[in-house]
């Protein structure tokens, strides 16, 4: 289990190699890489061109929140390894923002846990996107679809 | 205690953080919000009733009924938009 919050870009290949090296119980590695999209096409929001964004976060709380999400994934699925690398600071369109990788003996658990981690980190980790558009800076609003995606994984009481 | 503001709330309040000493009757996050509103027009706007924001007490997400007892750091922020 590993969580990193950093300003620098990451090398996906090197990260995945490091993650699985020496662990022969892993049969499947599911990976999600989030990128800065050039066009913002969120319905009900705005459709300006996004040239870059600045990701603000809450140092200290961010790491704790990501570690809790990661621990929850490990409680729910039989996982061999998990990695979350999330960037902060200014990023231009096309740059990588986040890497989530999950290794498990079997693919089902890896796919599900990877999707779970991405859904929950979007709604439970303290990051805020400030977009740069030709019309000026705009704080990104919360997206109802993200809340719905995260809610799928809430356990029924 | 230290109060911190993030994203647009930081700009609306006009500062990233401040040390405050609320009176004894301020016992919950909700009480603190009401008390902070009186500090400036920026505070009143950022922490307005109906504004979409959340809170954390000592770096853990907290609902507005959470008690402040012994809290060192309270943060206010808009909904998260990472990933």
Image (cartoon, grey):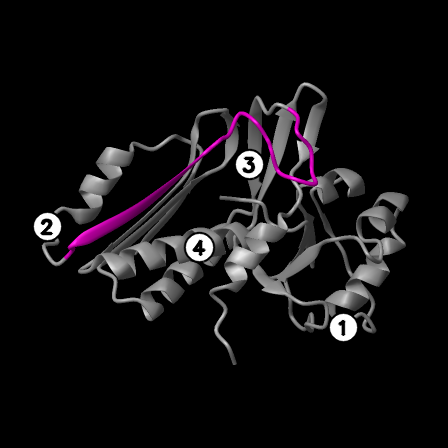
Which numbered mark, 3 or 1, is in the foreground of this view? 3
Same chain assignment for discs 1 and 2 = no
- Are the residues under badges 1 and 4 in a single subunit? no
User: What is the x, y in percent for residue A117?
Assistant: 41, 55
Tell me the number on the disc at residue B27: 1
Q: Nearer the viewer, residue B62 or A135?
A: A135
Give how far apart the Cα atoms at labels 3 and 4 are.
16 Å
* Of marks 1 and 2, the one in the foreground: 2
Per the model, the C-alpha gap separating discs 3 and 2 is 34 Å
Label 3–label 1 contact, CB within 8 A: no
Q: Chain of mark 4?
A: A
Residue A22 against residue A48 in the figure, above or below: below
Q: Is residue B73 visible?
A: no
Asked whether B5 falls inside the magenta stretch, the response is no
Q: Would residue A33 be visible to someone looking at this image?
A: yes
| In the image, residue B48 above or below residue B10 | below
Q: Earlier along the polypeptide chain: callout 3 or callout 4?
A: 3
Give the residue number, with chain letter if any, for mark 3. Answer: A55
Marks 1/2: CA–CA distance:
52 Å
* Residue B66 shown left or right of residue A35 in the figure: right
In the structure shown, which secondary structural element does the residue marked by tag 4 occupy? Answer: helix
Element on which disc 2 rests: loop
What is the crowding at mark 3: few (fewer than 14 residues within 10 Å), some, or many (at least 20)? many
Residue drawn 74% across the image and 40% down it:
B15
Disc 3 versus disc 1: distance between alpha carbons? 33 Å
CB under 8 Å between callouts 3 and 4? no
The answer to whether A110 appears left or right of B3 in the picture is left
Residue receiving disc 2: A22
Q: Which residue is mark 4?
A: A66
């Amino acid at each position: 289990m590993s969580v990193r919050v950093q300003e620098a870009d990451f090398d996906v290949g090197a990260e995945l190699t490091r993650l699985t090296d020496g662990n022969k119980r892993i049969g499947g590695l599911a990976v999600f890489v989030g990128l800065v999209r050039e066009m913002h096409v969120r319905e009900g929001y705005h459709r300006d061109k996004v040239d870059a964004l600045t990701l603000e976060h809450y140092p200290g709380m961010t790491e704790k929140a990501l570690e809790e999400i990661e621990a929850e994934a490990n409680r729910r699925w039989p996982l061999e390894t998990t990695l979350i690398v999330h960037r902060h600071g200014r990023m231009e369109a096309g740059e990588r923002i986040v890497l989530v990788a999950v290794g498990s003996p079997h693919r089902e658990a890896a796919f599900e846990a990877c999707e779970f981690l991405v859904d929950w980190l979007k709604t439970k980790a303290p990051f805020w996107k400030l977009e740069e558009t030709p019309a000026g800076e705009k704080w990104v609003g919360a997206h109802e679809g993200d809340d719905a995606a995260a809610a799928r994984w809430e356990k029924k009481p | 205690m230290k109060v911190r503001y993030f994203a647009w709330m930081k700009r609306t309040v006009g500062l990233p953080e401040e040390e405050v000493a609320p009176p004894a009757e301020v016992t919950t996050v909700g009480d603190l919000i009401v008390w902070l509103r009186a500090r400036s027009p920026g505070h009143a706007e950022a922490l307005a009733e109906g504004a979409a924001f959340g809170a954390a007490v000592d770096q853990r997400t907290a609902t507005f009924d959470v008690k402040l007892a012994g809290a060192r750091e309270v943060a206010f922020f808009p909904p998260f938009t990472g990933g």
